[in-house]
Amino acid sequence: MYSVCTYNETLYSNLYTWGQGGSGQLGHGLPMENKDSPHSVQELLGMMVTSVAAGSRHTIAVVSAPTGTAASALGMDK
């Protein structure tokens, strides 16, 4: 079981995920399913993603916004 994440460090970085998604760790909402190609995480659009960590059933993204820095958790065991 695996998932893959990538992001680009621009003013508004988009987080793209793909791979095993049965636990919601890809952040694409319902249905929770596998993705064979990169898809942007809509929940984080417009936010500056500064770092990402992925586990087997979850993904954590650190985002920076005008109001401060926060962590966004996706999937199980978050």
Image (spheres, rainbow, N blue to C red):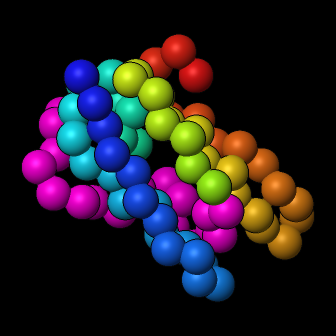
Task: Confirm whether the magenta stretch covers residue 40.
Answer: yes
Of 52 and 78, nearer the camera is: 52
The single residue placed furthest to the top in the displayed view is: 77
Relative to residue 28, is residue 65 depicted above or below?
Answer: below
Where does the image place residue 37, in percent across and percent down from the top left? 15, 57
At horizontal 40% and vertical 22% (from top left) the residue drawn is 57
Left or right, 78 with reference to 5: right
Q: Does the rendering let one see residue 3?
A: yes
Left or right, 10 with reference to 42: right
The number of discs equals: 0
At horizontal 40% and vertical 43% (from top left) the residue drawn is 27
Q: Does the rendering let one see residue 75?
A: no
Quadrant position of residue 46:
bottom right
Q: Tell me the magenta residue range.
A: 28-50
Quadrant position of residue 44:
bottom right
Relative to residue 45, is residue 24 depicted above or below?
Answer: above
Left or right, 17 with reference to 11: left
Of 54 and 64, nearer the camera is: 54
Where does the image place residue 24, in percent across and percent down from the top left? 36, 30
Where does the image place residue 78, in percent across and percent down from the top left? 58, 22
Quadrant position of residue 29:
top left
Relative to residue 2, is residue 38 depicted above or below?
Answer: below
Where does the image place residue 33, in percent across and percent down from the top left? 18, 33
At horizontal 88% and vertical 64% (from top left) the residue drawn is 67
At horizontal 77% and vertical 49% (from top left) the residue drawn is 70
Q: Quadrant of the N terminus?
A: top left
Task: Confirm whether the magenta stretch covers residue 32.
Answer: yes
The single residue placed furthest to the bottom in the displayed view is: 11
The single residue placed furthest to the left in the displayed view is: 36
